[in-house]
Amino acid sequence: MGRSRIVERGAARCTRRDWAAGRSAAGERDRRHQAALWSRLRCGESAAMRTLIAVCTTRAGQTSTSWAASVAWTLAETRTVTLLDCDMEGGTLADLLYLPVADRSIANCLGETVTSVGALESQMVTVPDRPNLRVVPGLRGTFGFDIVECLRRVGPALRELASDTVIADLGHPLSHPGLRSPRAAADAICSSFPRVFFILRDEPALISRSLDVLRAARLPRGELIICQQRSRSMQRVLAESLQRDLPDLPLRNGWSWDERRAARMVDTGRPMYLGGIDRELHL
């Protein structure tokens, strides 16, 4: 009987050691895979596949930053993603993700000349729980240029970044206080990004203002994402209004607001996981 217990204990210890060794080996394989991904991207193997995405809204408080972070978080499960905070009124991405930024900021790339890829990469912070996701923190304590000047300085470097997907949170660039021309801003955004998403809350008090902003900008291209917080009947009325007034900007699904998940995101610094968003939006 005693010999049987000794054998059982020995087998249990071996099992625990094997499990720990397997977990360590799996972690090492993940780290090697991630390093290989970034290495191949730096060598230019995936340049043709890179996706550049702009995320905007028409005024603050419409959840565009939460959506940008959630899309980046979701995509970074299977690919490398760079998320930039280009809100020229001061962004909150780093705060949302609880990132230690030190003195890193997009502000360090907004000098008198066009920034380099190396300068932009030096401002990146890797998200600990998502090693495939890197973030360039936004402005802190100051306002920036209008979006035309911002993209003139950083736009060329965005196209050369070593990432499968680059997502830029632009805030509300078509109604920035220092904006000189909504049309010029719209042209600059669409020239820099093949995909441009505008996030709008289905709040009746906001829709009239949103329509005015988007009509004034006369966007060459763009897609509308509705943050769904109201009833389905309200959503239908809103969809009909947008399709009537902005027929050239298609409506896309992809942002059903959940208060509990949003609260958890704020508490943990982990964005919402949007399963299937890559297929839904062809990202």
Image (cartoon, rainbow, N blue to C red):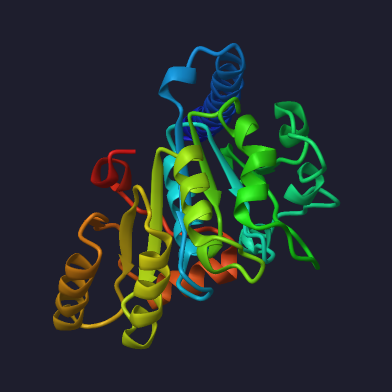
Image quadrant for the C terminus?
A: top left
Q: Is residue 181 above or below residue 83?
A: below
**Residue 47 percent coordinates (x, y):** 49, 19
Q: Which residue is outermost to the right?
A: 103
Q: From what the image shows, is residue 30 above or below residue 99? A: above
Q: At x 42% / y 70%, what residue is drawn?
A: 213
Asked if residue 87 lies left or right of residue 61, the reply is right
Rendered image quadrant of residue 35: top right
User: 84 above or below 177?
Assistant: above
* Residue 71 at x, y percent in the picture: 43, 50
Q: Residue at x 46, y 27 (%)?
A: 50
Q: Residue at x 24, y 54 (%)?
A: 248
Extreme residue toward the bottom, this view: 205
Tell me the residue at 46%/69% (across/down): 58
145 lies left or right of 171: right
Residue 232 in the image: state x and y as whole percent: 16, 78
| Side (left or right) of 203 relative to 20 | left
| Quadrant in which residue 208 is drawn | bottom left
Residue 283 seen: yes
Above or below, 253 against 133 in this view is below
Q: Is 5 or 107 nearer to us in this picture?
A: 107
Count of numbered marks: 0
Q: Is residue 57 left or right of residue 221?
A: right
